[in-house]
Image (cartoon, coloured by chain):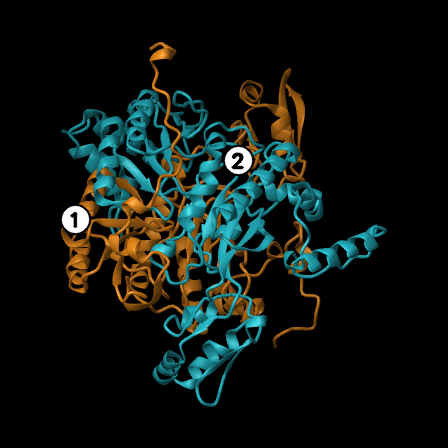
Chain colours: A cyan, B orange
Amino acid sequence: MAAKKIYPTPMLDVLEEGPWPSFITGIKALRDNHENQFIADVTSSLLGQLEHSYETRKGYWKGGTVSVFGYGGGVIPRFSEVADAFPESKEFHTIRVQPTPGNYYTTDMLNKLGDSWEKNGSGLQTFHGQTGNIMFIGTTTDGTQKFFDDINDYGWDMGGAGPCVRTAMSCVGAARCEMSNCNEHGIQRWLVNNFTDDVHRPALPYKFKFKISGCPNDCQNAIERADFAVIGTWRDDIRVDEAEIKNYVEAKGRQYIIDNVITRCPTQALALNDDDTIAIDNRNCVRCMHCINVMPKALRPGTDKGVTVLIGGKRTLKIGDLMGTVVVPFKKLETRDDYEELVELAEEIIDFWAENGLEHERCGEMIERIGLVNFLEGIDVEVDPNMVSSTRQSSYVRMDGWDDEAIKWFERKAEA
Amino acid sequence: MAMADMRPPIESGCPDGFQYMHPTMRRNFGLWKYHTDPKPGVLRHVAESGEEIFTVKCGTQRILDIFSLRELTSIGDEFADGFVRFTIRSNIEYYVTDESKIDPLIEALESKGYVVGGTKNSVAAMSHTQGWLHCDIPGTDASGVVKSMMDELIGEFKSWNMPNRVHITTSCCQINCGGQGDIAINIQHTKPPKIDHAQVSNVCERPSVVARCPVAAIRPAMVDGKPSLEVDEKKCICCGACFPPCPPMMINDAEHSKLAVWVGGNHSNARGKPTFQKLVASAIPNNPPRWPEAGAIVKLILKCYKEDARDWERVGEWVERIGWPRFFELTGLPFTKYHIDNWRGARASLNASTHIRF
């Protein structure tokens, strides 16, 4: 069955050429071959509007208010501003659905989700949007509720949209990566599922994102993008398989190992001995991962594993891009109590930010406005030299509490 | 329908991933020992137990129609073990434990037009945003830009010819949802918003729009007897932050919304600390359907990087080593006053030393 009306798409047609898979070819297939008349018509109209955007170099979607019963967020409402010309895609809402940590699926489950969407929506989906949601793109207000009721019955829940705790993301993790230092799956679900109310009912100053990477390679971009970044790391020595070091030297040559491993260590903690064994100054290793990345058969993270937590990463709006800042240099995550403490830290931070953040101010922006120390006092976390790249460079600060602070430092050291 | 008849949601949140995980992954969770790279697009992971799992990584069009999704799942059933995941860059990964399944799987994917690659020192699939297809504030498209560029970079996706991996991103507005990339192609508005004064008081909460401006260039004003907003065009940085909360602040412009290219964003802690991307080129036409001018600059930068960078250097590290003057010399791109930062923290980006290459 074909769409009742076909709109000409000369510019989009160009995007069917070339070797990379074409999204235009896919949308046209729905328009021309899908037996569901709604899908054929809505995708035809979508192509018409997109062609219009390509011609005029403007977007024509506007937001609005659409939700499902019981929730305040999770739907991205889209109403067309050019519905007179392209009426079949007048309403074209996206539903954000939380994936599993690490985005694992069986093919059966993907088919099942696809079937549900085919019954209630446009047949277009994305795995995944930049926040990490499965994006089911394009349905009516009525279809939104039906689709959600359907998938919610078999275990899927909506993600966040608006000023709320957002859908979280994890890397491939311990399920298939030898670099992993933590249970990313457990961390993500402990954290974000503690805040389901804050996911579904936007009431915070702005968005709040959790992202988890199993090692400092940070494949999830957590430090750059997450308000609450959890990065797996280790405290003890890098594990070395000397026989494999020798194999690398033999295969690649000494020069290669010196140029690409030894001298690339950011803290000069590596040396290649004359007998082709490796010397590692583990006290000065900053866990950057480079040597392990180059020689994964010979070097491995240690066994005293845990996580570093960094707070306040975000994209450009409004004060410019911010990286997260170390707030917890190292935390073991082994027992139930350990996980509960991590959740409590997240609660403290979100509560403090909800209380003190300005409207539309990300957590990192608030920290910049009030200063890291005020933030730390607000969430009851002690200062630590791992939180800074360098100490203060300006003398313009009142320091008459110095002696008390110094006593606190020695007391904390004595307790540790 | 009466409220009482409505179905209350089950607030199950983030689902458990273990139920969808390959049994070999479940058995060896946290017990992987090392990996090797048999060929582009294929990873082999070996566990302490001696068990192995192979990953075949496959690029997609990201905006998946149901026919394509079913094609990908049926390939997963017939040629792989029925367990998959999607990467952060919208590749689909298939898992098999039997090495002899790899080649038929790759053949099946490629025969349907999918592309296997994106591992190790390749140009990875571009991460992208919604664009004109579905966003409410975009200055450009995303899917079309990505399709156009990947058509040209497909050879680099399928091979290991780069000094290190290259992540390319796009963003359709200056909020930069595409994130940080070794190379980023982002919208850059060049003129202040045009204001639809008739609409402002109908659709905008004016104090929030005023508060949203990063440089305090917006103030309430009466225009033609109606409450509206005005922009101090000398202060305006054309960022578009006022547009999402107030669509009458029309920032998108067919001619003046340009593209800019940035380099050196890197999320990894490997070698150096994570870095943000830096501006290299702007005033590039936003030119659908193929954006050839932006594509040419990306390819130029990739060519210089490939020829000049050392093994394992990411784009940003390469520029850091050779210095910005040499970057502009090698690429032939112009260095302008717009490359010198005057925003927060700008001083940290100035050269306060005699470290100069001659």
The disc, 2 or 1, on the residue closer to the chain's N-terminal end is 1
Give the residue at x 26% y 52%: B22
Q: Can you name the residue that lies furthest to the bottom here?
A: A274
> Compared to B304, does A363 lie above or below?
above
- Give the residue type that dot 2 points to: Ile
Q: Give the quadrant of the C terminus of chain B.
A: bottom right
Closer to the camera in the image, A307 or A249: A307
**Where residue A208 appears, x then y in whole percent?**
53, 39
Residue pointed to by mark 2:
B251
Q: Is residue B103 left or right of residue A138?
A: left
Q: Are marks 2 and 1 on the same chain?
A: yes
Residue pointed to by mark 1:
B77
> Compared to A312, does A273 lie above or below?
below
Element type at marker 2? Answer: loop
- Give the residue type that dot 1 points to: Asp
Asked whether residue B309 appears in the rendered view, the answer is no
Q: Is residue A262 left or right of residue B160?
A: right
> Compared to B46, does A167 lie above or below?
above
Give the residue at x 61% y 31%: A359
